[in-house]
């Protein structure tokens, strides 16, 4: 393979080039006309040679840039040939003077520079060589007609020198070449490295040549000599870029796109091969085998990857080239039909399967890479399936335990009521019938019995309420939270007419949930706030809401006794209390009920507080859907 570091010019090549230029300089001193003919013929031969190479390769060449440039250089060389014949003292076109060859020169340079520029925009497009040739022929005929009929602007006046048009044209041509240079560098990935360098150098030298031709007065001046020498160098660089490269390394020039495609294909194959070897999923390629009626009757393993061996425990030499019935004689024949349908119809399948012969669970995806073939990608999911089965088993046990616990709680709650009523009732009868015979201490003990019996009844009611929350069917609707909070507060306020309380309900966002259950949430939280602000005058409660991340958050804030955040974990537990019964009455079930209700709605409950600085309780509900039921 060619090394990129190889030099573009050998030492001998440079020496020969310098000697040749020196020889041409010497010739110019004796006969400038001879020098001019030799210099122009050099570029003309190269121009025609480029055309010959590209034109004869046009049916197999895949580089549109070269097709366009090859045809363009034929006409550039043709103009240079006419320019040479029209040069002063050649006496081929009598009576035209020095203006004619200069006009032909400018026409050729315009054609060359514009062709180099335009060709870069045609890369990647389909071009018809015949149309390009016809177009250039028409353009050339029009230019020659304009020049020989005097329509084309004058470029040189004997005794005066170059005209303004000629000088400006050289600068414009240089600018076009510079634009070609920039555009070529922008598209450098489209060129072979060596070809790019040679073409860039050729354009730079050509720009220098054009600038040199802006200074001479007579056609035999030094600047004219320098311009022609630079032109020789430029065309030699083009010769090396196109002709030498095209003949010695045609795949780097004429078929570069093909070469790039082949390289991309090799890299793609390497990537897929690496994926095939290193993928963690098992892979197998198969050929379907059909009977005389075209019905699938077996399939053959064509290739497997290392993961296949790891996941199945079957070595490559045991399976590749063999048929399924040979490798797995006890396998269910239904898989022949399943995979046969994939290979014949092209419809992929995805399923989970327990392989009886391998005693493993697999997740399988099968598709058709080509007619009568199918490929299978699979992964071992035995551990996952066993874990899921274990989770399902434990979930079922947990659900059964919850059902038993709820049934137990409910039955115990009901069964305890009878003895409690008996304790309370008989205590009351004893006190009524024989209370005057008891001393003060005994009567106090009977009062304690009755008070604790009533407290036990309240705890049972709370336990029943907690149990019912989980069993209650929910009717989801949009709730007017302002209205609901106001109704709940009105009921609670009537129970405490003696209290000095201030409640502020800001405009709240609507909620989405079960109205009766959310009413219970507001009732429990407001009751708590009233209870724990009994030592404040006034007791203040603020109710507000705001939008969260996909939820609406509601807040109830009070100026009560607050709580210590160190005991936060006990706050929402059943029968958990942060204050003694003597300080604040209650069962310790209210917040647990709130948490269970909000949890059933898919939200969450949390709180913040400080001792003697009040507390804030928050709960969130899902945001309302765009289409909803009526507001309640």
Image (tube, grey):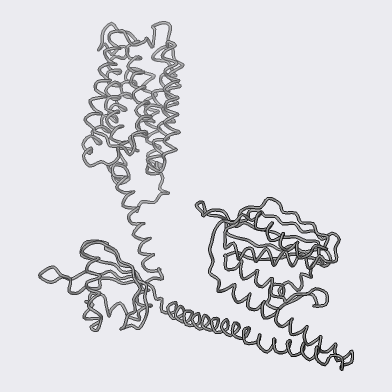
Confirm whether residue 31 shows in the render. no
Q: Residue furthest right?
A: 440
The residue nearer to you, when weighing 245 against 255, is 255
**Residue 233: % across, % down:** 39, 30
Viewport quadrant of the C terminus: bottom right
Counting from the top left corner in percent of width and height, residue 12 is at 38, 40
Q: Nearer the viewer, residue 425 or 483?
A: 425
Closer to us: 329 or 304: 329
Q: Is residue 50 above or below residue 1?
A: above
Q: Residue 366 location, x and y as percent?
A: 30, 67
Q: Residue at x 57, y 68 (%)?
A: 600
Point 79% across, 91% down: residue = 430
Task: Name above or below for residue 47 compared with residue 585.
Answer: above
The relative height of residue 382 versus residue 556 in the rendered view (above or below) is below
Q: What is the number of callouts on the image?
A: 0
Q: Is residue 459 left or right of residue 313?
A: right
């Amino acid at each position: 393979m060619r090394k990129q570091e190889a030099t573009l010019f050998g030492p001998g090549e440079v020496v020969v080039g310098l000697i040749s230029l020196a020889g041409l300089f010497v010739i110019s001193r004796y006969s400038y006309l001879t020098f001019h003919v030799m210099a122009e013929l050099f570029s003309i031969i190269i121009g025609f040679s480029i055309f010959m190479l590209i034109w004869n390769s046009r049916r197999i060449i895949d580089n549109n840039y070269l097709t366009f440039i090859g045809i363009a250089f034929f006409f550039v060389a043709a103009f240079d040939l006419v320019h040479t014949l029209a040069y002063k003292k050649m006496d081929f076109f009598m009576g035209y003077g020095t203006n004619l060859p200069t006009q032909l020169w400018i026409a050729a340079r315009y054609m060359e520079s514009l062709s180099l520029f335009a060709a870069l925009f045609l890369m990647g497009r389909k071009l018809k060589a015949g149309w390009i040739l016809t177009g250039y022929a028409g353009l050339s005929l029009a230019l020659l007609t304009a020049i020989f009929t005097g329509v084309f602007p004058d470029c040189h006046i004997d005794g005066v020198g170059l005209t303004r048009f000629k000088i400006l044209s050289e600068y414009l041509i240089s600018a076009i070449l510079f634009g070609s240079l920039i555009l070529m560098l922008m598209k450098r990935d489209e060129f072979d490295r060596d070809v790019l360098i040679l073409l860039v150098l050729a354009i730079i030298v050509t720009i220098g040549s054009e600038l040199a031709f802006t200074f001479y007065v007579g056609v035999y001046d030094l600047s004219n000599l320098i311009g022609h020498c630079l032109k020789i160098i430029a065309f030699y660089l083009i010769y090396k870029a196109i002709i030498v490269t095209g003949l010695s390394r045609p795949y780097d020039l004429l078929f570069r796109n093909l070469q790039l495609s082949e390289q991309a294909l090799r890299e793609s194959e390497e990537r897929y091969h690496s994926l095939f070897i290193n993928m963690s999923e098992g892979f197998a390629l198969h050929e379907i085998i059909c009977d005389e009626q075209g019905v699938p009757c077996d399939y053959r393993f064509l290739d497997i990857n290392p993961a296949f061996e790891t996941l199945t425990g079957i070595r490559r030499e045991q399976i590749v080239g063999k048929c399924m019935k040979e490798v797995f004689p006890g396998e269910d024949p239904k898989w022949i039909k399943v995979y046969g349908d994939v290979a014949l119809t092209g419809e992929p399948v995805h399923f989970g399967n327990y392989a009886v012969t391998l005693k493993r669970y697999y997740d399988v995806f099968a598709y058709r890479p080509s007619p009568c073939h199918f490929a299978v990608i699979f992964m071992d999911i035995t551990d996952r399936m066993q874990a899921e089965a274990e989770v399902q088993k434990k979930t079922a046990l947990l659900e059964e335990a919850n059902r038993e616990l709820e049934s137990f709680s409910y039955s115990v709650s009901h069964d305890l009521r009878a003895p409690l009523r008996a304790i309370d009732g008989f205590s009351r009868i004893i006190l009524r019938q024989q209370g005057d015979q008891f001393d003060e201490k005994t009567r106090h003990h009977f009062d304690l019995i009755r008070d604790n019996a009533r407290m036990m009844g309240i705890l049972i009611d709370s336990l029943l309420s907690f149990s019912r929350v989980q069993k209650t069917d929910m009717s989801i609707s949009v709730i007017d939270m302002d209205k609901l909070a106001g109704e709940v507060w009105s009921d609670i306020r009537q129970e405490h007419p003696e209290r000095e309380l201030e409640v502020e309900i800001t405009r709240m966002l609507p909620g989405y949930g079960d109205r009766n259950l959310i009413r219970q949430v507001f009732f429990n939280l407001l009751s708590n706030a009233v209870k724990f602000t009994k030592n404040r005058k006034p007791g203040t409660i603020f109710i507000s809401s705001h939008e969260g991340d996909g939820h609406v958050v509601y807040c109830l804030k009070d100026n009560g006794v607050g709580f210590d955040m160190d005991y936060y974990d006990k706050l929402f537990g059943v029968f958990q209390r942060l204050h003694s019964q003597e300080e604040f009455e209650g069962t310790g079930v209210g917040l647990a009920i709130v948490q269970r209700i909000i949890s059933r709605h898919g939200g969450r409950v949390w709180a913040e507080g400080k001792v003697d600085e009040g507390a804030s309780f928050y709960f969130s509900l899902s945001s309302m859907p765009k289409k909803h039921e009526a507001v309640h």
